[in-house]
Amino acid sequence: MFYFDTLYGKEILKSDYLEGVNHFFTTRDGFDFDKIGAARILTPNQTHSANVQIVGKRAEYPETDGLIISDPGDAVCLRFADCTPLMFYDSKKHVAAVSHAGWRGTASKIGVITVKKMQEFYGSVPKDIIAVIGPAISICCYEVGDDVKEKLLSTVSDKTDLLDGNRVDLKAINSRQLEETGIKKIDTCPYCTVCDNDMFFSYRKENGTNERHYALMML
Ligand SMILES: [Zn+2]
């Protein structure tokens, strides 16, 4: 379940599925990330790619839309305004990840790619991974063309309850993809960045705004 909290005087959103790890989504309130005391804050240069990287010594991650961290003190932080934020945590291996799934990332299954990399590099088992799907444009407000709709639907075997006409549920499609990898614990945020635009930024509602809210995890 998602709940609002206050951190260093700013309103943030959290999931109780991730009580075991530092994480939060920022709101329109903004946030001063210097306050969290991370050794490093990794911020990839997001380009709606399906590129997921394991964080190593380097600090720069160009054309990257998912980062996986495993070192204590490291934080990963991605930016959003409508696109779907995905958080992952494996408490057994103490590995965390954040990915950025707009329609392109969702069509290329960036969430599944993130899970596969956690399996490959750290031996994570999907049933031990907790996934959290953050605030994003929701089915109420996300109308797409037939081509995009078909691309998104083709990513899952079970296609039930993901559409309403040409409106698609990006959060549910990401959730279904993750369920189909074997993840059992998935918390999906009820907030829509368009309907709940008083709390979050929306690229669509705010005519291509440059403002973003953030999804951060820290080990
Ligand atoms: Zn909405």
Image (cartoon, grey):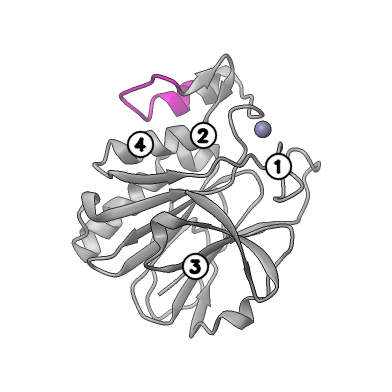
The answer to which of marks 1 and 4 sits earlier in the sequence is: 4
> Where does residue 207 sit, x and y in percent of width and height?
81, 41
Find out whether the residues at labels 2 and 4 contact each other: C-beta distance under 8 Å: no
Rate crowding at label 4 as few (under 14), some (14 to 19) or many (20 or more) other CA atoms within 10 Å. many
> Where does residue 195 sit, x and y in percent of width and height?
71, 36
Nearer the viewer's eye, disc 1 or disc 4?
A: 1
Q: Ligand 1: does it lie within 8 Å of the C-beta at label 4?
A: no
Above or below, 41 relative to 137: below
The answer to which of marks 1 and 3 sits earlier in the sequence is: 3
Above or below, 134 relative to 27: above
Rate crowding at label 2 as few (under 14), some (14 to 19) or many (20 or more) other CA atoms within 10 Å. many
Helix, strand or loop at label 2? It is: helix
Q: What residue type is labelled 2?
A: Leu
Q: Name the residue under label 2.
A: 170
> Where does residue 28 sit, x and y in percent of width and height?
73, 57
Query: Residue 61 bears which disc, if any?
Result: 3
Q: What residue type is labelled 4?
A: Gln
Query: Within the image, what quadrant is residue 82 found in?
Result: top right
Q: Please give the range of residues in magenta.
A: 150-161
- Find the residue positioned furthest to the top: 165
Query: Within the image, what quadrant is residue 11 found in?
Result: bottom right
Residue at (61, 24) in percent of width and height: 144
Judge by depth and name the residue closer to the eye, 1 or 93. 1
Side (left or right) of 194 relative to 190: right
Q: Name the residue under label 1.
A: 196
Q: Name the residue under label 4.
A: 177
Nearer the viewer's eye, disc 4 or disc 3?
A: 4
The answer to which of marks 2 and 3 sits earlier in the sequence is: 3
Helix, strand or loop at label 1? It is: loop
Q: Ligand 1: does it lie within 8 Å of the C-beta at label 3?
A: no
Q: Distance between the residues labelled 2 and 3?
A: 25 Å
